[in-house]
Image (cartoon, helix red, strand yellow):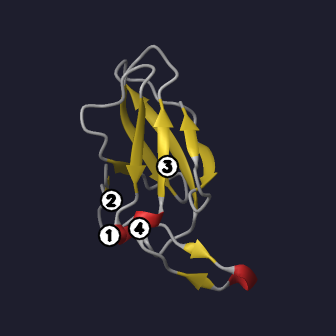
Amino acid sequence: MIFKNIRIGFTTIALSVAAYGGVAATAHADEFSFTATNTTKVAITGILVSENKNDWGYFDIGNGIKPGATSNLVWDQSTNSENCEQWVKATFADDTESEPAKFDFCESGLKLDF
């Protein structure tokens, strides 16, 4: 699944690797993936991400994530220039949203449960 941008006027909500000493480094997007597990009884219809909790982009999760299912999501290469730490929330088939939570997407083996 690939991240798709929904912002107007800003091209990406992106991901970067922060190196020690505050110097930014870039890496290939295929290095940045995570799993999302739906622990609810309602299908997840969207996963949204933001650096600032105001401008949200989304991952293409196809037809959604069914209750009890897990999907592997991969950051698109266009996201290689922003912070590792991003806010994340899920949207559900019943038109509700989860509360935003902050995660470090540079963390290897990151698992998100909604």
Numbered mark located on residue 7 in the image: 2
Q: CA distance from mark 2 to mark 4?
A: 20 Å
User: Of the residues tagged 3 and 1, which is closer to the observer?
Assistant: 3
Upstream in the sequence, badge 2 or badge 4? 2
Upstream in the sequence, badge 3 or badge 2? 2
Q: Are marks 2 and 1 in contact (CB under 8 Å)?
A: yes
Residue under pointer 4: 29
Residue 10 visible in the displayed image:
no
User: Of the residues tagged 2 and 4, which is closer to the observer?
Assistant: 4
Q: Amino acid at mark 2?
A: Arg
Q: Amino acid at mark 4?
A: Ala
Numbered mark located on residue 34 in the image: 3
Q: Amino acid at mark 1?
A: Thr
Q: CA distance from mark 2 to mark 1?
A: 7 Å
Q: Are marks 3 and 2 in contact (CB under 8 Å)?
A: no
Q: Amino acid at mark 3?
A: Phe
Q: Dot 4: what SS? A: helix
> Crowding at label 4, few (<14), some or many (≥20) Cα neighbours within 10 Å?
some
Q: Quadrant of residue 12?
A: bottom left
The vertical placement of 40 against 6, above or below, is: above
> How many numbered callouts?
4
Q: Residue furthest right?
A: 21
Residue drawn at point x = 59 percent, y = 57 percent:
108
Residue 45 visible in the displayed image:
yes
Q: Dot 3: what SS? A: strand
Residue drawn at point x = 52 percent, y = 22 percent:
39
Q: CA distance from mark 3 to mark 1?
A: 22 Å
Residue under pointer 1: 11
User: Of the residues tagged 3 and 2, which is closer to the observer?
Assistant: 3
Numbered mark located on residue 83 in the image: none
